[in-house]
Amino acid sequence: MTAFFTHCWKNTRLELVAVLLLVLLATAWSSPLRADTASAEVSLLRLERAPEGIFLYANVKVELPAAVEDALMKGVPMFFVAQADVVRHRWYWTDRRVASAQRHMRLAYQPLTRRWRLNVASGVITASSVGLALNLNFDSLADAMSAVQRMSGWKIADASQIEADATHKVEFRFELDLAQLPRPFQIGVFGQSDWSISATASQQIGPEGSR
């Protein structure tokens, strides 16, 4: 009987050691992935309050990972999304989102013409709606990405949505939208750090007429 329990205890200890080794290996492998995670940075965020509403100016610095650039060169379109939420602070309750705006950008390489096409729209760009979006053409990927990363005079809220005498906060987010990739790519890239591109920033804007 003693030999039986001793054998079971040894087996249990071996199983625990194996589990610990697996955890350590997972940590060792995941740490470099986190360190190498592709990211973006909001290098400029400026807001203007005009009689028509609030306008946003932003520059985002993005270093495209090799995997993303390679997919682009093979004709796989990439979808970038910029979102701006305008929040009204309320001391007596939780903050309230009073306005929200999105800019969807579809970037694709045209092998026949060797040019880059950028479609820009306020909603999700689909095969049926791509013709309704703003279409821009570029000779190089660098020029196309420059347009993707720069937002100038983007109206994110109407005057009717903003309280003239109140201070608001704008929460800005830019990201590569993996959910809009072709289905085979979605299965392969979710969870991979090489495909994680996102940046956030926020800024307050004072009452109308303030500096």
Image (cartoon, grey):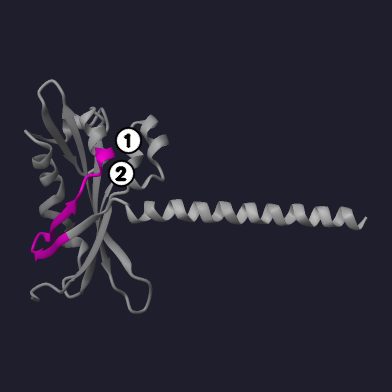
Question: Which sits in the foreground, 199 or 123?
Answer: 199
| Image coordinates for residue 134, horizontal then vertical, percent | 13, 37
Question: Which sits in the foreground, 200 or 50?
Answer: 200
Whether residue 13 sits left or right of residue 132 in the image: it is right
Check the picture and name the quadrant holding the N terminus. Answer: bottom right
Q: Which residue of the protein is positioned furthest toward the right in this rendering?
A: 1
- Residues at circles 2 and 1 in contact by the CB criterion of under 8 Å: yes
Q: Which residue is mark 2?
A: 177
Per the model, the C-alpha gap separating discs 2 and 1 is 8 Å
Q: Which residues are magenta?
A: 43-68
Q: Which residue of the protein is positioned furthest toward the top in this rendering?
A: 112
Question: Which sits in the foreground, 204 or 28?
Answer: 28
- The rendered magenta stretch, by its main secondary structure, is classed as strand
Q: Which residue of the protein is positioned furthest toward the bottom in this rendering?
A: 91
- Tell me, yes or no, whether the highlighted magenta stretch contains residue 199: no
Q: Amino acid at mark 2?
A: Asp
Is label 2 in a helix, a strand or a loop?
loop
Say which residue appears at 13% left-offset and 64% top-offset: 47
Say which residue appears at 20% left-offset and 74% top-offset: 166
Q: Which residue is mark 1?
A: 181
Q: Is residue 46 visible to the viewer in this orientation of the structure?
A: yes
Is label 1 in a helix, a strand or a loop?
loop
